[in-house]
């Protein structure tokens, strides 16, 4: 399950509704028998499980559609549209590798691995701009910003340490 935080909120809301509405389920004439109460709770749990499964399915489909859309945006050089779009040819914004690292981070959280072709192309783009092989020379000019370095570290961590273990 990729979207656990929303499930927690959904579960807490449903549990609160069951607790608050429990007395309203009683017959007008008095209390509900323990067997009837258990049956109603079991029915509510089944309904909650079905709602959770449906919610998880819809969220995961949305994540897959978003990742597919993102992959289609990739350019031939491995980069994604960003800060340098309106600049003259062969001119780049120094934040471009950081923006592309965020794309790698997003794809990693959507299930991509370090062997994914889109990820490899984007990391090669970032590497070439860091080393100065093409475009920027962040290493040689000392223009590597904290933002770019931090986003690259986050992206690499998500790719090579997907469970978040230390």
Image (cartoon, rainbow, N blue to C red):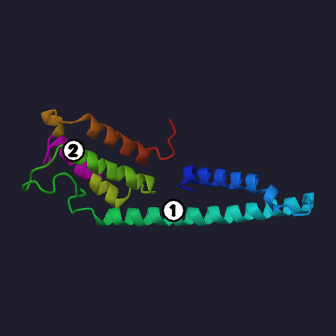
In this rendering, would 35 be left or right of 25? right
Region of the chain picked out in magenta, as a range: 123-137
Residue 93, given in percent of the width and then of the height, sits at 16, 46
Identify the main secondary structure in magenta. helix
Q: What count of labels does the image hold?
A: 2
Q: Would residue 114 be visible to someone looking at this image?
A: no
Q: Name which quarter of the figure residue 70 lies in.
A: bottom left
Q: Quickly name the residue at label 2.
A: 95
- Report the residue at 75% width, 57% height from top: 21
What secondary structure is found at the residue carrying circle 2? loop
- Report the residue at 27% width, 40% height from top: 148
Q: Would residue 62 be visible to someone looking at this image?
A: yes
Residue 107, given in percent of the width and then of the height, sits at 39, 55
In this rendering, would 16 be left or right of 5? right
Give residue 101's mark. Answer: none
Distance, label 1 to label 2, CA atoms, is: 31 Å
Residue furthest out toward the front: 28
What secondary structure is found at the residue carrying circle 1? helix
Q: Quickly name the residue at label 1.
A: 59
Disc 1 crowd, CA 10 A, few/some/many (<14, 14-19, 20+): some
Task: Please report contact status of discs 1 and 2: CB closer than 8 Å, yes or no.
Answer: no
Is 103 included in the stretch rendered in magenta?
no
Which of 44 and 152 lies nearest the eye of the viewer? 44
Residue 15, given in percent of the width and then of the height, sits at 71, 53
140 is higher (above) or lower (below) than 68: above
Residue furthest out toward the left: 88
Which numbered disc, 1 or 2, marks the residue closer to the eye? 1
């Amino acid at each position: 399950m990729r979207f656990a935080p929303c499930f927690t909120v959904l579960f807490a809301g449903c549990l609160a509704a069951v607790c608050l509405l429990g007395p309203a389920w009683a017959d007008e004439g008095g209390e509900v028998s323990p067997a009837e109460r258990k049956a109603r709770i079991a029915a509510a749990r089944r309904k909650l499980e079905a709602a959770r499964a449906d919610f998880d399915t819809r969220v995961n489909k949305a994540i897959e559609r978003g990742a597919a859309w993102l992959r289609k945006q990739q350019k031939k050089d491995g980069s994604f549209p960003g800060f340098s779009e309106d600049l003259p040819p062969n001119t780049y914004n120094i934040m471009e590798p950081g923006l592309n690292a965020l794309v790698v981070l997003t794809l990693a959280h959507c299930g991509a691995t370090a062997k994914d072709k889109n990820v490899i192309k984007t990391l090669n783009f970032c590497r070439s701009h860091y080393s100065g092989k093409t475009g920027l020379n962040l290493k040689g000019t000392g223009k590597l910003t904290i933002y770019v370095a931090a986003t690259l570290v986050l992206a690499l961590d998500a790719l090579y340490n997907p469970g978040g273990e230390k």
